[in-house]
Amino acid sequence: MPKNPAPHTPIEVGDGAAIPHKGDAGLFTAWRIAFFGAIFVSLYLAFGKPDPYFEIFKFVPDGILVTFKVTVGAILLATLIGLITGLGRISSNRLVNGTASLYVEVIRGIPLLVQIFYIYYALGRFVKIPDMLSAIIAMAVCYGAYMGEVFRAGIQSIPKGQMEAALSLGMSRSQAMRQVILPQAFRVVLPPIGNEFIALLKDSSLVSILAVSDLLRRGREYASETFSYFETYTVIALIYLIMTLFFSKLIGIMEERLNAGK
Amino acid sequence: MKLLRTLAATAALLSTLSLTAFAAPKSIKVATDATWPPMEMVDANKQIVGYDIDFLKAVAKEAGVAVEIKNTAWDGIFAGLDSDRYDAIISSVTITKERQAKYDFTEPYTSIGQILVVPKTNKTAKVIADLKGKKVGAQIGTTGAMEIKKVTGVELKTYDEIGLAFEDMAAGRISGVVCDEPVAAHFALQKKEYRDKFKIVGKSFTKEAYGMVVKKGNKELVALLNKGIKAVKAKKLDVKIHTKWVK
């Protein structure tokens, strides 16, 4: 037993998160294995077994474009709705707060498929909206509620002192929100928002219940004509996987950029 | 040597098993997509009813087997047969060359044709080609969808259920629907909400025959069902069923 134990190394108290951000762990990250693996399998199938795989790959690209458009459109709209809802949820105005809360509670309680269906066919009875747009609106309305909760949590995670400090500097409430709270909150919400994006991309397959020719519907059309269900769904799964991995990388890069200043 | 014997024994066992499975079925599972009124649909009492269902029951009675009817989505109904979820399909399946290449059919039990339905506001359209530059709907994977696809310049929209195509036409998103004639008559002439909005134009423009579908090579079941179909036709039961469901 050592008589003079080494003095404790002092605990460093820093600014950032308690657990530091971990960078890329070597050459074989999970992302790279999944992404390049999926591409490799796709290429192998397309060129190694061109019948029927190459045919399927040739048949579905316009579906990919539709899925991409619906996803990106819905993400932009949902983020906007989410931000408004999130701010509404922390508002002290009872009407605004109540409306935002009601929206979140109602939307969160109804399955996405039912909502998409309802918005598409119910709205269609009153106003004529092109099918692609109504698909985007349906997805955005559904995801706006979840995004709203993410934004609310993000904003509330910023210590109260920040707002107090900003106000004491003579900023107005909205100015403090825009210039002090939201930029900090954005960094906090980015990972969960990224999660929502990827979930939205996958859930966009639900719009194939509408007559929107997205990736899944294109695949189903191919399968129902050729009866090669297994092969078609393999291709569809691979394409969705590649797309979501692409998105997750994009969000990862954004996260790193935002954390670079830390 | 031993391995060879084991293999031979397994093969023999498997073949007897499959033979007994096919030989004289006492009860068969038959799938249908009950969204195709009046051929097959779910009534107010949640029972699957319709022309095909009555016909199947009559066939089963004549052939001496019990049937269990399973309601399945049309999209994937053939995949379910592939994976042995049921023994046969009766769901207004048109006998086509493409389908015959993958599955075995019974002999035809009734014949129909495809027909076009348009909104009443459209005074000029008579055939699909008249709807160039517009969207025309059909149920996914049906002969109606294939007919629309043949016409260049018309955009095909596919739906999971034919009722959704009519609903979308009521909302003004598509300009026509193509489906089997009795189904068109059901939606365009009998359904209260649509009667004032839609009309059937022209005559049916294809000649198609419905058959029951079984897995490729299931000769015993085809023979059994054919025996039943022949008996039903001989007793003129099919005429009775026809007048009951198709007006």
Image (spheres, coloured by chain):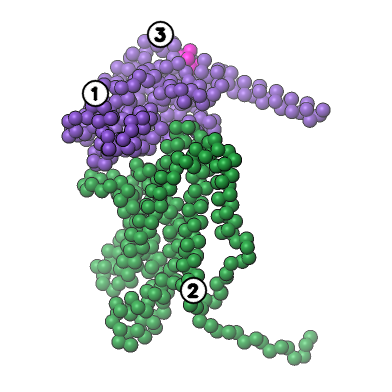
Chain colours: A green, B purple
Residue drawn at (36%, 81%) of the image: A163
Residue that badge 2 annotates: A259
Q: Secondary structure at mark 1?
A: loop
Q: Amino acid at mark 1?
A: Gly
Residue that badge 3 annotates: B234
Residue drawn at (78%, 27%) of the image: B4
**Which subunit holds the residue at mark 1?**
B
Residue drawn at (29%, 17%) of the image: B243
Q: Is residue B54 above or below residue A174?
A: above
Residue that badge 1 annotates: B202
Label 3 crowd bin: few (<14), some (14–19), many (20+), radius 10 Å: few
Q: Position of residue B53 (x, y in %)?
A: 39, 23
Q: Position of residue B229 (x, y in %)?
A: 44, 14
Residue drawn at (56%, 21%) of the image: B217
- Is residue A148 visible to us here? yes
Q: Position of residue B69 (x, y in %)?
A: 45, 28
Q: Quadrant of residue B43?
A: top left
Nearer the observer: mark 1 or 3; the answer is 1
Q: Amino acid at mark 2?
A: Asn
For this rendering, which residue is in front, A80 or A245?
A245
Q: Are marks 2 and 3 on the same chain?
A: no
Position of B146 with respect to A241 (left or right) is left
Question: Magenta segment, which residues?
Answer: B224-228
Q: Secondary structure at mark 2?
A: helix
